[in-house]
Image (cartoon, helix red, strand yellow):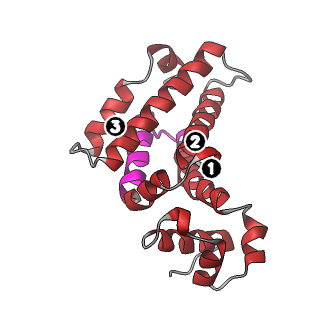
C-alpha cells in the first residue's frame, strides 16, 4: 500500500486495495483497518461506515472536476472526459461498488445524488443565482439519471466506444433548456 498524505486517504487506499480482491459487500471495517494498520476508532473518527467511505472516494475526484470548471476555462466537455477517464481508470472498483451495494447504501444512489448536487451547485454558481427554476432542477435530475445509467452500462458491458465518442454522446444529451444555464459565458 502506498503512503497517503491524510488518514482518510490512507483508509480509502486500503479499501480500494481490498476491493480489487474481494466483493465490497464482504469487506469489513476490521479488514480495512487491519490492511492499513489503523484502529476501528480511527476509521470511525473519519467515516460513519464503509458506505460513507465509498461516497467520499467517489466524491473527491468529481468535486475536483467541478472545481476546475468553476475556476478555469475548463469546459463542460473536458469535465465529461475527465469523469469518463476516472470511470475507466477505476472500472473494476466501480463495477464492484455498483454490483455489491444495495438499498439506501446503493453506490448508484450515491452517484445520482452527488452528481445532481454538484451539477446543480455548478449551474447556480455559473449563473450567480440563489435558486434555479423547478423545470431546470427537473432537467438536471433527468440528465444526471440518464448519463449515470448510461455510464454504468458503458462500464459494466465494456462498450466498444472511445472516451471521446462517449463524451460527445453525453454532451449531445444535454437538454436544450439546460444548455442555456450550463454554457453561460
Image coordinates for residue 10, horizontal then vertical, percent: 61, 75
Taken as a whole, is the magenta stretch helix, strand or loop? helix
Q: Is residue 76 magenta?
A: yes
Question: Left or right of 41: which side holds 95?
Answer: left
Q: Which mark is residue 109?
A: 2
Q: Tell me, yes or no, whether the two marked residues, 2 and 1, touch with CB atoms within 8 Å.
A: yes
Earlier along the polypeptide chain: callout 1 or callout 3? 1
Q: How many marks?
A: 3
Q: Residues within 10 Å of mark 2 (few under 14, many from 20)?
A: some
Q: Is residue 102 magenta?
A: no
On the image, which quarter does residue 32 sit in?
A: bottom right
| Residue that numbered label 3 is attached to | 167
Span shown in magenta? 69-88
Disc number placed over residue 105 in the picture, else none: 1
C-alpha distance separating marks 1 and 3: 28 Å
> Front-most of 61 and 13?
13
Quarter occupied by residue 47: bottom right
Where is 107 relative to 74, above or below? Answer: below
Residue 40 x, y percent position in the rendering = 73, 77
The answer to whether 163 appears left or right of 97 in the picture is left
Q: Secondary structure at mark 1?
A: helix
Give the CA distance from mark 2 to mark 3. Answer: 22 Å
Amino acid at each position: 500500500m502506498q503512503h497517503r498524505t491524510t488518514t482518510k486517504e490512507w483508509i480509502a487506499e486500503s479499501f480500494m486495495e481490498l476491493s480489487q480482491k474481494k466483493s465490497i459487500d464482504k469487506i469489513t471495517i476490521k479488514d480495512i483497518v487491519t490492511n492499513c494498520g489503523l484502529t476501528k476508532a480511527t476509521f470511525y473518527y473519519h467515516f460513519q461506515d464503509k458506505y460513507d467511505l465509498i461516497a467520499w472516494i467517489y466524491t473527491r475526484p468529481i468535486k475536483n472536476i467541478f472545481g476546475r470548471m468553476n475556476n478555469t476555462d475548463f469546459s463542460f466537455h473536458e469535465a465529461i472526459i475527465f469523469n469518463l477517464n476516472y470511470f475507466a481508470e477505476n472500472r473494476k472498483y466501480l463495477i464492484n461498488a455498483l454490483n455489491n451495494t444495495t438499498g439506501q447504501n446503493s453506490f448508484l444512489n450515491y452517484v445520482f445524488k452527488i452528481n445532481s448536487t454538484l451539477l446543480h451547485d455548478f449551474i447556480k454558481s455559473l449563473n450567480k443565482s440563489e435558486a434555479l427554476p423547478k423545470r431546470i432542477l427537473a432537467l438536471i435530475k433527468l440528465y444526471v439519471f440518464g448519463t449515470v445509467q448510461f455510464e454504468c452500462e458503458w462500464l459494466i458491458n465494456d462498450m466498444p466506444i472511445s472516451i471521446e465518442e462517449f463524451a460527445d454522446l453525453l454532451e449531445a444529451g444535454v437538454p436544450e433548456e439546460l444548455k442555456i444555464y450550463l454554457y453561460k459565458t
